[in-house]
Image (spheres, grey):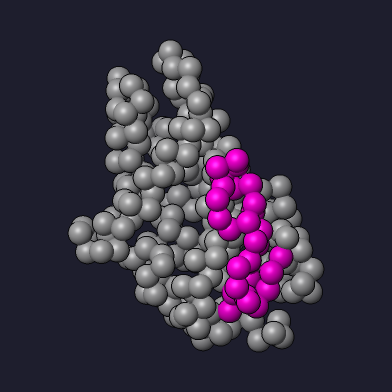
Amino acid sequence: MAATTIKALVFDVFGTVVDWRSSIAREAKESLAPKGGDADWLGFADAWRGKYQPAMERVRSGGRGYVRLDVLHRENLVELLAERGFDRLSETEIDHLNKAWHRLDGWSDSPAGLTRLKTKFIIGTMSNGNVALMVNMAKHAGLPWDVILGAEPAQAYKPTPQTYLTGVEWLGLEPAEVLMCAAHNSDLLAAGACGLRTAFIARPHEYGPNQDRDFKAEHAFDYISENMLDLADQLGC
């Protein structure tokens, strides 16, 4: 597909652009180890992330109205802390740990790759993260977004079509002029069904040794890349 027909690139962020697992494990250890906990911090990160899809599904299914991901993350954290025996944190301490999602580190190729892509295309998020979370993360990790799109602007969570299509509309573009970039096959399939172009970025270590899917592109996406720099090469940036 000719890259000249593409005007904007939008990105899944958690796992595609940033390494949430190592970052959350680090933050959990810093916050909880002083409380006397000697835990599997990567396991803690996996368990917190494991509550992510079920929490969003209650919104997608109409079981509750839209609330920001920060709210869902905090509810999930409180539940997880109780499960793991960390139930004596102050509200301020819980808030600080919950904001760990605002302080995720990018994969090593992400800042440079996005900077290159930005020279030729509009680049933005297409994430379930809320706007404040995305902006703070960008400042922390050096991610040079032009625009923050996704769940909060659409008031809906991926893979609901409204999420992708609201972003396209806000950019004033047609779906075929927007390239959805993600490390997750299901995300790209959902975006492609809405008419967006698709690019797979391999992140085979997102879940560490627990990863059981998304090792490679499983469908005929428009672009298939090994990392962000490879995608920039393919797009002539």
Residue 75 x %, y %: 29, 41
Q: Is residue 95 left or right of residue 105?
A: left
Residue 148 x %, y %: 49, 63
Can you name the residue that lies furthest to the left here?
A: 63
**Quadrant of the rendered structure where residue 165 is?**
bottom left
**Quadrant of the rendered structure where residue 221 is?**
bottom right
Q: Is residue 124 visible?
A: no
**What's the residue at 65%, 61% (across, down)?**
216
The stretch of residues the image draws in magenta is 197-225
**What's the residue at 34%, 65% (across, down)?**
156
Residue 174 x %, y %: 51, 86
Magenta stretch encompasses residue 222: yes
Comparing 23 with 225, the one in front is 225
Residue 85 x %, y %: 33, 21
Q: Is residue 173 above or below residue 54?
A: below
Q: Is residue 204 above or below residue 237?
A: above
Can you name the residue that lies furthest to the top here?
A: 36
Task: Label the magenta part by its dominant secondary structure.
Answer: loop
Q: What quarter of the picture does the N terminus occupy?
A: bottom right
Q: Is residue 28 visible?
A: yes
Can you name the residue that lies furthest to the front here?
A: 212
